[in-house]
Amino acid sequence: MRTPHYAPLISLVALCTLGPQAQAYELYNEDDGATVLNADLWAGFGWFGSEKNYLANPQEEPGRMRWQEGFAKYGLNGTTNKIGPGSIYGGFSLISTGSWGDGDAGAITAGNERRTAVEDAYLGWKSGDLIPALGTDGVDFSFGRQLVTVDGFLITDDGFAPGKAFSPIPGVADGRFNRGGAFYLGPRLAFGNTAVLKLGGTDGLHGSLMWLKSDNPGQSETEVAAATIDYTTPIGSIGSTYVHGLDVNERYTFADRSERKGMDIYSIRGQGNAGIENADFAFEVARQEKRSGSQRAMFFDAGYTFADVKWQPAVSYRYSRYSEGWDFLFQGGFRKRYQGEVAANYAGSVTSNMQINDVLFSVQPTDKLTLNAMYFHYHQLSDRDTQDFSAREVDLYLDWMVTDNITLSPLVGFYKPKKWLEDGGLQSGSASTNTYLQFIVWVTF
């Protein structure tokens, strides 16, 4: 049985360059920012190729696949402090996505997906100086359809974007999980419905309470409640996250998704430079309690930038580990350390039953060009359904800001699995090294 993909869905290329609302075009500005209305555009198009595939279908030899993905997100956002105390903010956007060609190398998309739908539709209120004890904007309440991200790896976004080919049951792809293509680019990040209360700002002691309801069939339309508490200083922050599973849609449950209802997750996490200039550290240790038992996951990473050296070389190391029954929940790639290109997206789950070591090295010849190299070693912790996703991967890529609005991101990856389709892996043809290519154009206005 093929293991479903539990991949982080935004590439490291994207998270190193652009955010979904990195820029905006100002349509209206009254009284020096008292009331502001912005227009947003975020778009991307990618060309992809893989010399091997991971379809778990012997009829697809030798396995070469070519496909394309694209999206455009467009809308409005604004804020005003002229209606009562504090300020009111909100946003509305649509997103159009599509996939073309053979479909991706992991049988998530078929290459004929298209969809336009509402992406953001939210309102919020910030307290301004109304409650001095909590600081400026010490209360921030928002609701509606929006992106919600929590530090660490438990809740990053709702970006998992399967297409018509995705099926947890081999041979049964009825399209019920289809979100309209652009699986790799993964721009559909917003949760279907939310209510988020943040208290205390971003410094000192602060926290949040939230309710998140996914409308993503690939996430079994999971509904959760969550709480965070953090203490932030100039050298870093320490915090904790608690997540409780409220419900799932049984029509879309597969594998152990039904256990999300009633599941409890606890974590301790931290990040910062620990007082060391140009250093960066982060960690999280998490535990899941569900009907089948306890599961654990953790990561630690450390990095350093040689800021006084030509091209400002930076190096970092990350260790992560996920127990055999770990549920990845809403772990994504956007604004987080990515877990590899081929391994994470196409070649099998890397967020359960896996130990991962990876190293990132980058240099910045100019303020608009960054060259990157990553090495990954994936080691499966125990046998599971006779499949073994142990592998090594090297990814070489660059981020080139051609203009303030356009970034080009070419990448070449080399993926060497321990096993292939006929002896317990997923790769077609053989366990020889697969060459993977992609070229993405990102646009923001």
Image (tube, rainbow, N blue to C red):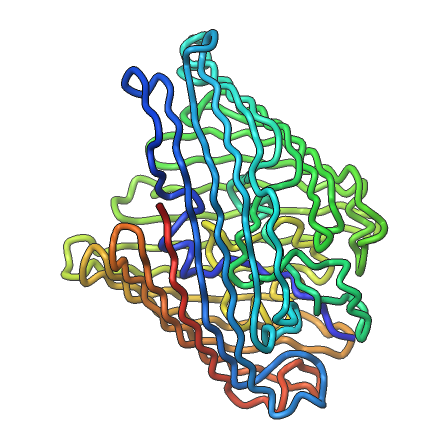
- Residue 28 drawn at (x, y percent): 34, 26
* Image-quadrant location for residue 344: bottom right
- Residue 95 drawn at (x, y percent): 54, 48
Depicted 425 relative to depicted 311: above or below = below
* Image-quadrant location for residue 375: bottom left
Q: Choose between 119 and 317: the one closer to the eye.
A: 119
Q: Choose between 402 and 19: the one closer to the eye.
A: 402
- Residue 247 drawn at (x, y percent): 80, 40
Residue 353 lies left or right of residue 285; in this view the side is right
- Residue 285 drawn at (x, y percent): 58, 47
Query: Could you tell me which residue is drawn at 85 percent across and 49 percent down?
Result: 250
Query: Could you tell me which residue is drawn at 67 percent across and 79 percent down?
Result: 55
Depicted 242 relative to depicted 335: above or below = above
Total marks in image: 0
The N terminus sits in image quarter = bottom right
Query: Could you tell me which residue is drawn at 78 percent across and 69 percent down?
Result: 173
The C terminus sits in image quarter = top left
Q: Choose between 425 and 297: the one closer to the eye.
A: 425
Residue 240 lies left or right of residue 175; in this view the side is left
